[in-house]
Image: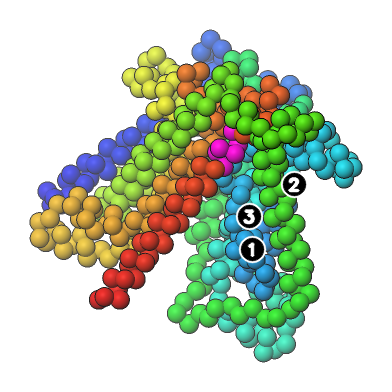
Amino acid sequence: MTTARLPQLLVLFICVVVFTTVLILPMFSLFSKAFMGKTGEFVGFANYLTYFNTPTLSASVLNTIDIAAWATVFSVTLGFLYAYALLRTRIWGKTFFKYAALIPIFIPTVVHALGLVYLFGKQGVVTRAGFFPFELYGRVGIILSEIIFTFPQAFLMFYIALEFSDGRLYEAADSMGVSGLKKLLRITLPELKFTVINAVFVCFTLAFTDFGAPKVIGGSFNVLATDIYKQVAGQFNFNMGAVVGTLLLIPAVASFTVDRLVNSQNASTLNAKATSYVTKQSHPRDAFFFLVCSMVSVFLLALVVMLFVGGFSENYPYNLSFTLKNFVFNASAGGMGSFVNSVFMAVLTAVFGTIFVFVYAYLLEKTSRGGALTKYGKLLSVLPLALPGMVIGISFIFFFNSSANPLNFIYGTVAILVVANVLHYFSVPFLTATGSLKKLDKEFESVSDSMNVPRWKTFLRVSVPLSLPAILEIFMYFFVNAMITVSAVVFLYSAKFKIAAIAITHMEEAGNFGQAAAMSLLILGINVCVRIAYEAAIKAIQRRKAKKEKVA
């Protein structure tokens, strides 16, 4: 090993130690707490027996499985149909439909529930018209909220899978006179089997662990996510909260395991001989899928429209006079400061998260002879996929709130919120960074070593500029998710540093639906602006690259 590589290995070692500190040690604290009594003595599985022998608590497990299963069935089905419509039909307005499907990504899950209240609550537009004969608060409302939450995830997974499929099998089927239905059943669905499996587990896990929607619209219908909140924030029963936290890990760990197995078997079938899929004309098919996309997009847009109505109305639904008073937020919910705090937290999360993710991915990808350190580092990078936000939050309480922990000073500050967000959303940006770095020629590092150029200069002058689109995507991903997160920070924010997504839940609890809608619009607005800025930057980079290639 050359001495030039020693600083790189040292930095990698430091990153791995930091990652272990914020990931492995808090998880150890969580599991330890689940097997301890209130006075700190070891009690084995006594806490679990108490939980499952308490009817009101054990029922939460079945309730959570129920809503997650129904949400998964509808989300995966709608996600496939929507993606199929955009890539395998000739319907009009594909760009509009694509962006409409992404609306739920830009707002917290508590806002999904709030939009449903405006539409289907007791004074909702649809309910008052007599078209919704169900009780929104409880099981039905949670399922609808989780469908809204998980639908974009399923849609994006199917969209990517269908976009890169090979058209040769379809050409052969057409030459043999195979019907469209048979092509769907015998070619399309078998090609997507791994995507279907992944989508099912991802949607189930997201719905199983979500806290925002059940908190707002759950009523007396208990689920695990609200149980853990009641045990920790309501009754200060940290041991039982740890028990529920470990139960929340079950589907997440199962999803993680299946994802690893599926990815190891899902070899790419796309090669240089592949051809693009050519969509045939079919008016009945296009009419059906246009109707599906229209219904889904209108429903999602209706949620946003109702936020505007509620946010700018004097007293919905009794007085619809235009007003801006709802944007003067009550101090008890954090006032406008909660929104400013959220933006500040999101910026810090995006900046430090992007730096750490890209440096970490670079070190793992470009460090040769890292041995066990590199393997352990790669294992750490994928583990956050199996950690729900609420589990991260409660494990941070047990670990960082300990007076014996030298890192205790960050508890109750914005720093712990940033660390929780970076950890919660780490894996997807890491995969993005790794994918970008793999495309770079390894000769860059070889040449710099032969010329005795420090690796950090190669990193800053070559790797970063060439990976700028991926870096911007990572920044945008961290920012948007930090603005909308509830579960990862609900246990960690302090009274002095309230954030917007949490403030919405407090406004809803106090009956200030107008202010909750107004705050939701601010979150939506800032996230859409960041997305627009990201796409503008990407187009500018592409134009500059095309201009250079033309000159060359």
Name which quarter of the figure residue 25 lies in.
Answer: top left
Asked if residue 169 is positioned above or below residue 500 in the image, the reply reads below
Residue 101 got which mark? 3
Label 2 vs label 1, nearer the camera: 1
User: Of circles 3 and 1, which is in front?
Assistant: 3
Local crowd at mark 2 within 10 Å, few (<14), some, or many (≥20)?
some
Question: Which residue bears the numbered disc 1?
Answer: 83
Which residue corresponds to the image point at 66% horizontal and 57% vertical from the top-left?
A: 79
Vertical position of residue 530 compared to residue 221: above or below: below
Residue 18: which quarter of the image?
Answer: top left
Is residue 99 visible to the viewer in this orientation of the structure? yes
| Quadrant of the image containing the C terminus | bottom left
Q: Earlier in the sequence, mark 2 or mark 3?
A: 2
Q: Label 3 is placed on what type of residue?
A: Ala
The verdict on residue 387 being magenta is: no
Q: Secondary structure at mark 3?
A: helix
Are the residues tagged 2 and 3 within 8 Å (C-beta)?
no
Residue drawn at the location 73% of the way across and 72% of the way down: 286
Q: Residues within 10 Å of mark 3 (few under 14, many from 20)?
A: many
- State the separation of the CA atoms marked 2 and 1: 20 Å
Up the image or down, 212 lies above or below 366; here it is above
In the rendered structure, which segment of residues is drawn in magenta?
519-524
Residue at which label 2 appears: 70
